[in-house]
Image (cartoon, rainbow, N blue to C red):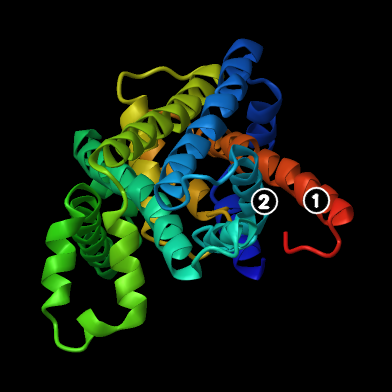
Amino acid sequence: MFLVALLLTLLAKHLDLPALQNQLLHVSPFYLLAALILVIPNVVLQYLRWHTLVRSQLPQMPATRIWRSLWIGFPLGVVTPARLGEHARITCLLPASRTQLTTISLLDRQVGGVITSMIGAIALWLLPTWHAATYSGMGEAFRRLLFVAGGAVLFSNAVLLLTLLMPQHLTSIVQRIPRIGLLKTWIKVRDALCRITVARRLLVLLWSVLFYCTFILQLVFLIEGLGFSHRLLWAAAAGTMFIKTLFPISPGDLGVRELVAAALFSTISVAPEAAVAGSLMLYMMNVLLPALVGLVILLLWRRQHPGESQ
């Protein structure tokens, strides 16, 4: 939380706080409602992706347990950088293999990252002078760090995409590496990947693309609701989501996302205060709201089943 406070303090020094407050209070009710309604497909698409992967390993797993595990992951994810706490949702699906459940949980999160990074990288080059406007005054070293980190993420995500589309090729390569191919943990990981049929892999990609479109559209609606319109609003939103994934240093990405949004949206003449206001509202809708609902579900479950793991 100290890091979040530091990031928000840094951001506040470069913003007109009364203007930010005014933006938050005067968003168009129509666009705000449209963005809020999209929270429903946002959560449903996350469930469909998780459900598809869980059923690949556990065909008989009740949908209610899968649904509950998704919600319980939200509050645990909001308090950890890069939302790592969400992976604790696998505890709801035990006593199945922890290794296999962890494998699909990591795959579930990373497939979304693949879509975010690949579209986001393209979007950055569509923004006018984004490289200069975003990082002026921050130093050449930071710009180089950004490109190195971005390149590394794009490469790793390309590997992950190939892992999803053609797991047999990856597993056959790893299998040839001395000792690794005989490890029990690797065998479980391999089995988990190979159990995902082609149809399920394509479904996971489809749910990921649709999920990505929902939160990009939400941010576009919120910025338009604050009185700004531009044909590249989606590109600024996509670039923001990509760059903030390169720096998973704060819980829920709070502070990082707002700093990036203020910089990128300014390249298309959106006031920094509007970009930050839109980003904060998106955070409240897509991160805080599901986390609060998930916390209630977690507490109710533990009260009703005190002797069981959540």
Q: Is residue 302 left or right of residue 16?
A: right
Q: Are marks 1 and 2 in contact (CB under 8 Å)?
A: yes
Tell me the distance, in whole angstroms, between the alpha carbons under discs 1 and 2.
Answer: 10 Å
Q: Amino acid at mark 1?
A: Trp
Q: Nearer the viewer, residue 261 or 98?
A: 98
Location of residue 286 (image quadrant): top right
Count of marks, rendered view: 2
Q: Is residue 235 left or right of residue 55?
A: left
Q: Amino acid at mark 2?
A: Ile
Image coordinates of residue 28 in percent, x first then y, are: 62, 14
Residue 72: mark: 2
The residue sitting at 20% across, 47% down in the picture is 165
Vertical relation: 127 (above or below) 106:
above
State the quadrant of the N terminus.
bottom right
User: For numbered disc 2, what is the local secondary structure?
Assistant: helix
Farthest-out residue, front: 60
| N-terminal label among 1 and 2 | 2
* Residue hosting label 1: 301
**Mark 2, other Cα within 10 Å: few <14 / some 14–19 / many ≥20:** many
